[in-house]
Amino acid sequence: MRAPALYSAAGSLILTTLAATPAGSVPRVPDTAAAELRGTAVAAARARAAGIDFGRCAADLEAPATFRCGTVSVPLDYAHPDGKQIRLTVSRVAATHTDPHNSKRRVPRQGVLVYNPGGPGASGMLFPMIGVLPEWKRVAASYDLVGYAPRGVGRSAPLSCVDPGHFFKAPSQAPTHPSASYKEARINEAKAYAQGCLKRSGSGLRHYTSLNNARDLDVLRAALGEDRLTFMGASYGTYFGALYATLFPSHVRRMVLDSAVNPDPERIWYRNNLEQSAAFEGRWADFREWIARHDDVYGLGDTAAKVQASYDRASRRLARKAAAGKVGPGQLQGAFLSAGYYDDFWPSRADALSRFLKGDAGPLVRLAAPTAETAAEAENSNAVYTAVECNDAPWPTDWKTWDQDNTRLARVAPFETWGNAFMNLPCAYWPVPRQQALDVRTGPGELPPTLILQAERDAATPYAGALEMNRRLSGSVLVTERDAGTHGIGGGPNQCVNGYLEAYLLEGRLPERRASCAGHPEPKASVPADHTRRKNPRVSLTGEAGRR
């Protein structure tokens, strides 16, 4: 697919002229860092001695019988390892030892493979289910597959910032050029949300950080009885995986970073979000061009501009009257934003838009309407996302900076810019001290060779981030899926990518230098049998739309 000129030229130009993030964080003094390092060693030693008592999983996990679940204790504050403890939930499916190509051949166990799907705020508890898929059976034969809910997520000392019953505001608007009054309302909401996080979560809120996620990972490693960790992180999971590699390089056995966050401390997290918004404009253009090529199926226009006009017409109609009283322009935008993550969502979204414009709102409602059953999980996920990103690094505290940067970017990237800005705006008014982002990097020989996987047109974690990660982690090797934009590509439909992943995890083999794979085929235009929220096992491995 051709890179749209909008993103490659104008969008990049805007991003290079954005204002720098102002200071305003609380620097981490050496004594605190040393205390946290000692605290991690203390917590890891205790976890190794205690182990994890795996047993039946909670009924609400809806896990198969092969799943075993347990908990591991970690300090809320690693500078005080004898202080308050929190418990992280962990899931495991034992290695099958069975070669999927030769059932009589017994495969030796290589240890555990721990996975994190990103977010921040996503749970990996269901990750071990992946072992039943053909793409993962060889890995599942050699490794115990281990998932967990990071601190703050699910049952792992859950965070909350608002009453879940009031979390979904539907229908909602999705202004690409918000008015002054709309901005003022969102500023007030952001201030109230930030205060709600402190009120509902207390003074411990400051300890929900990426650095503590990395420390928790080392305690989990010890609790699992592993001297060295085999870890795979997707999306945001690549960032604290890189923090782990920087803090504990000798504890790494193998590490896969799939869809890499740019770890440059100057980009954590304000500038990364601006760059993400610009990249989504490019991916939205890819989707519109695909719909236009299949105008005979969807009837939304035979050019990207005509498809945009169809989308805008639907948005205006929803602004006048929400579908089923629940789906407004904001919900429409959310449904189409998820298509920027995964192109296998393209047919269902295109068909739902087509049917809505022809008078049938049912498919769009089923795709986009918020549901009461998912409100608590969504509120918790958003609270963790906000707390981690706000705590991790400095953010601009002057609304003028946000307004200027996003106004300029929205001129060339209107699709996601303001939605992303308002989602992150509580960080401007965050009520607890912030950290300085760690300077991620390892020197030659410090870290075992690691594998980075990246789709060239990934919008959630733009490609430049993978290049920067590759540069900072000495000995790492980048494998690129060309002309593709799926977020999270390991174990997906691209057999070339999966070949590199298997060779690394099973044999420790990496290409000598950067490698690439041709992109997987685009989805076929079709009319889906239904438009329910089916969870594709591959897709569910990465964070939900609106996150990394």
Image: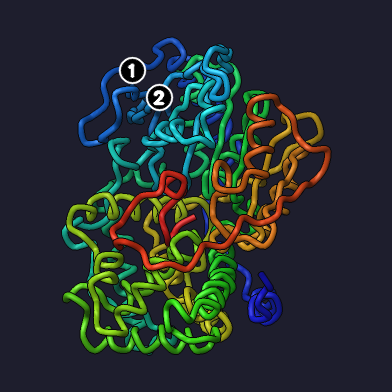
In x, y percent, where is residue 264? 66, 54
Return the residue at label 1.
54
Q: Is residue 377 above or below residue 307?
A: above
Badge 1: few (under 14), some or many (20 or more) residues near its Cα, within 10 Å? some
Q: From the viewer's perspective, is residue 441 above or below residue 434?
A: above
Element carrying mark 2: strand
Residue 31, compared with residue 2, is above or below; it is: above
Is 427 left, or right, of 326 in this rendering? Answer: right
Quadrant placement of the N terminus: bottom right
Which of the 4 image quadrants contains residue 348? bottom left
Q: Give the residue type that dot 1 points to.
A: Phe
Q: Which mark is residue 92?
A: 2
Above or below, comparing residue 441 to residue 197 in the picture: above
Which residue appears farthest toward the front when viewing the image?
296
Instruction: Please tell me how crowded label 2 is: few (under 14), some (14-19), or many (20+) other residues with Cα within 10 Å.
Output: many
Seen at 50% across and 51% down, the residue is: 392
Query: Residue at 47% of width from left, 85% of height from top?
Result: 308
Q: Where does the image place residue 457, in percent across and percent down from the top left? A: 63, 63
Residue 101 left/right relative to 441: left
